Image (cartoon, rainbow, N blue to C red):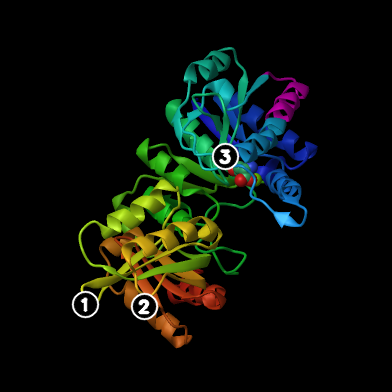
């Protein structure tokens, strides 16, 4: 008996039949004596379809314009609103009670960073009232509302953030993330055929993996889960098998040196050359980039002999349009002599494992595997529990496979 928050992603609610299957699962969970909150995503590719539609409308007279971000969010929230209503109807049709809420209706307040808003608060009262009445509460994922009442969205894949945030404020016993795969894998199984499902993984490892392009869970969702210590269970909506548990780190997790490998497929390296090497420059550059809500991947600084520095950072390819004007202006102002460069077609391959805290030799094994495959390493970055190499984009999938093999992750 407890309080369980379940989330069904787009593919798990892609049509009427699947919505009924998800509804059945929620009802079964409730009938075992639990209170159940269900967070849903838009049906199937509904969000992508809406984005396509916006693109069409924003191309006018042969010219592509960028849709205003507020209007984009106004459009995208409709996807999840469809699913909550249908899910509540499905539960009703199966003879049980449910009520659906948009983000705004449960007081899910965010800042006003349209398209990547951050959750500030949730009014749990309304949810608890309905749970007390024996209803299953359905909540729209991915959306919130500003204090002024404007609709916002939480970034692609944002229903996971909703799942964990709702789980955290309700102090749920578990957040179940139902998806179309069996759990978190040692590598993306679409690229690495012998990838294996991981049974348990720590928040920190999962944070690294999701930040590195393992797409099942948004980084922010895992951060939230860690902060509020909510166990997350990622599992398949189409079967009953146990998925992957994401939990606080335990000492015996250190036996496993490497838990998984990940690939970020499409990065750009931005370089500001010969900027003055004095205090405040990096703060200035990254302050402006952060103010534009652009997430920077790795930062590399090389100090030159002439009191200047080359500062490079990587961002996802999709951020280029937002980054470029900021960097171009900064370079002009800081007097960088050799103008910014933008190096595209990069990928990042990484190994992640809590066991790296106590085991040595991981970096050497990774670099040797790449060397044996004649893949050139362009940059290396590390944290306590991960090692990343920037390589050519075209080498990405192969690098992922050989590193996976080098650490024998395909073996049980
Ligand atoms: N529907 C949104 C998306 O496709 C949110 C989500 O699925 O989590 O990104
Ligand atoms: Mg989706």
Residue 12, quarter of picture? top right
Residue 43, quarter of picture? top right
Q: Which of the two labelled residues, at mark 1 and mark 3, occupies the earlier sequence position?
A: 3
Q: Quadrant of ligand 1?
A: top right
The front one of 1 and 333 is 333
- Does the segment drawn in magenta span residue 265? no
Q: In the rendered structure, find residue 365 and report the number of the disc placed on it.
A: 2
The front one of 171 and 123 is 123
Vertical side of 149 occupied by 200: above or below: below
> Looking at the picture, how far across and down is residue 282, in whole percent?
29, 59
User: What residue sits 68% from the left and 29% below the top?
Assistant: 84
Image position of 359 (left or right of 341): left
Q: Which of the two labelled residues, at mark 1 and mark 2, occupies the earlier sequence position?
A: 1
User: What residue sits 29% from the left and 60% below the top?
Assistant: 384
Q: Mark 1 or mark 2: which is in front?
A: 1
Q: Is mark 1 within 8 Å of ligand 1?
A: no
Badge 3 is on which residue? Answer: 159
> Looking at the picture, how far across and down is residue 238, in whole percent?
68, 45
> Looking at the picture, how far across and down is residue 240, in whole percent?
62, 44
Badge 1 is on which residue? Answer: 306
The front one of 405 and 149 is 149
Q: Which of the two labelled residues, at mark 2 and mark 3, occupies the earlier sequence position?
A: 3
Q: Is mark 3 within 8 Å of ligand 1?
A: yes
- Does the segment drawn in magenta span residue 95? yes
């Amino acid at each position: 008996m407890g309080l369980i928050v379940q989330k069904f992603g787009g593919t798990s609610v892609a049509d009427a039949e699947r919505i009924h299957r998800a509804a059945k699962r929620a009802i079964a969970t409730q009938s075992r004596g639990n209170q159940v909150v269900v967070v849903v995503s838009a049906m199937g590719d509904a969000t992508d379809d809406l984005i396509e539609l916006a693109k069409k409308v924003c191309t006018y007279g042969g010219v592509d314009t960028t849709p205003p971000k507020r209007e984009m969010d106004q459009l995208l929230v409709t996807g999840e609103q469809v699913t909550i209503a249908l899910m509540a109807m499905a539960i009703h049709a199966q003879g049980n009670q449910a009520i659906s809420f948009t983000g705004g209706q449960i007081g899910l307040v965010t800042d006003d960073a349209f398209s990547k808003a951050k959750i500030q608060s949730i009014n749990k009262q309304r949810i608890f009232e309905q749970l007390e009445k024996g209803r299953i509460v359905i909540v729209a994922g991915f959306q919130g509302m500003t204090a002024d009442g404007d609709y916002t969205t939480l970034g692609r894949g944002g229903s996971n953030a909703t799942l964990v945030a709702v789980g955290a404020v309700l102090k749920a016993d578990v957040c179940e993330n139902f998806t179309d795969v069996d759990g978190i894998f040692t590598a993306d199984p679409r690229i690495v055929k012998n990838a294996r499902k991981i049974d348990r993984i720590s928040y920190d490892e999962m944070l690294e993996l999701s930040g590195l392009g393992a797409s099942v869970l948004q980084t922010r969702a895992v951060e939230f889960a860690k902060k509020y210590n909510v166990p997350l269970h990622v599992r398949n909506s189409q079967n009953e098998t146990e998925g992957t548990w994401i939990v606080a780190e335990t000492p015996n997790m250190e036996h496993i040196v490497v838990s998984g490998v990940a690939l970020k497929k499409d990065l750009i390296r931005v370089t500001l050359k010969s900027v003055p090497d004095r205090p405040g420059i990096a703060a200035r550059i990254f302050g402006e980039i952060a103010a534009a809500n652009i997430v920077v991947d790795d930062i590399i600084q090389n100090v030159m002999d002439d009191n200047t520095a080359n500062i490079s950072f990587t961002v996802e390819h999709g951020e280029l349009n937002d980054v470029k004007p900021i960097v171009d202006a900064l370079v002009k102002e800081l007097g960088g002599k050799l103008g910014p460069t933008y190096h595209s077609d990069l990928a990042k391959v990484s190994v992640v494992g809590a066991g790296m805290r106590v085991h040595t030799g991981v970096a050497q094994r990774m670099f040797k595997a790449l060397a044996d495959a004649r893949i050139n390493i362009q940059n290396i970055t590390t944290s306590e529990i991960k090692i990343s190499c920037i390589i050519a984009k075209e080498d990405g999938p192969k690098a992922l496979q050989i590193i996976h093999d080098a650490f024998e992750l395909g073996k049980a």
